[in-house]
Image (spheres, helix red, strand yellow):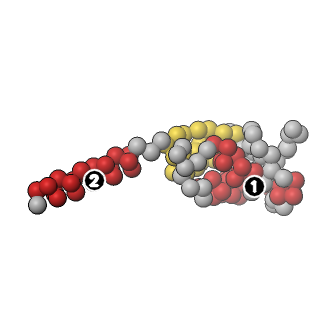
Amino acid sequence: MKKAINLTIGLLLIASFSVFSQEVKTEKIKIFGNCGMCKSRIEKAVSSLEGVTKADWDKETKMLEVSFDESKLKLDDVHKAVAAVGHDTEKEKASDEVYNALAGCCKYERKSK
């Protein structure tokens, strides 16, 4: 009986260490947009990615602060998710089709790459 209890406690400790050993990383990336609708769209796209624990875009600085589990997600995936909803980043450009479908207030000045 005592051996079973010790085994159970040991398994619980191992499980708790694996939960806390996740590699949570916080990064800031520039994302182009203008308004509250942009903020909502960007944060929703990033928050929907598996492994993201925080996504906060500042419309004044155009910077997204994102926290994520590096074992589940790469930063490039964040860039691609944002571009997929119409917003250019430092590394990814949204397709013209998706960008052109944005509301007028969301259309920012695009830089050519």
Q: Nearer the viewer, mark 1 or mark 2?
A: 2
Amino acid at circle 2: Leu
At x 59% / y 38%, what residue is drawn?
Answer: 27
Q: Is residue 21 visible?
A: yes
| Residue on which disc 1 sits | 84
Q: Nearer the viewer, residue 4 or 41?
A: 4
User: How far across and how far down the image is residue 97, in percent?
Assistant: 87, 58
At x 72% / y 49%, what residue is drawn?
Answer: 80
Q: Residue furthest left?
A: 2
Question: What's the mark number on residue 12?
Answer: none
User: How far across and how far down the image is residue 68, in percent?
Assistant: 54, 46
Location of the C terminus by quadrant is top right
Q: Nearer the viewer, residue 59 or 96?
A: 96
User: How far across and how far down the image is residue 76, in percent?
Assistant: 67, 43
Q: Nearer the viewer, residue 57 or 77?
A: 77
Q: Are marks 1 and 2 in contact (CB under 8 Å)?
A: no
At x 58% / y 48%, what residue is drawn?
Answer: 73
Q: Say which quarter of the image contains residue 41.
A: bottom right
Q: Secondary structure at mark 1?
A: helix
Q: Is residue 36 visible?
A: no
| Residue on which disc 2 sits | 11
In the image, taking residue 12 as reference, residue 111 lies left or right, namely right
The crowding category of the residue bearing disc 1, from other C-alpha atoms within 10 Å (few below 14, some 14 to 19, many at least 20), is some
Amino acid at circle 1: Ala
User: How far across and how far down the image is residue 55, in percent?
Assistant: 58, 49
At x 24% / y 50%, what residue is drawn?
Answer: 10
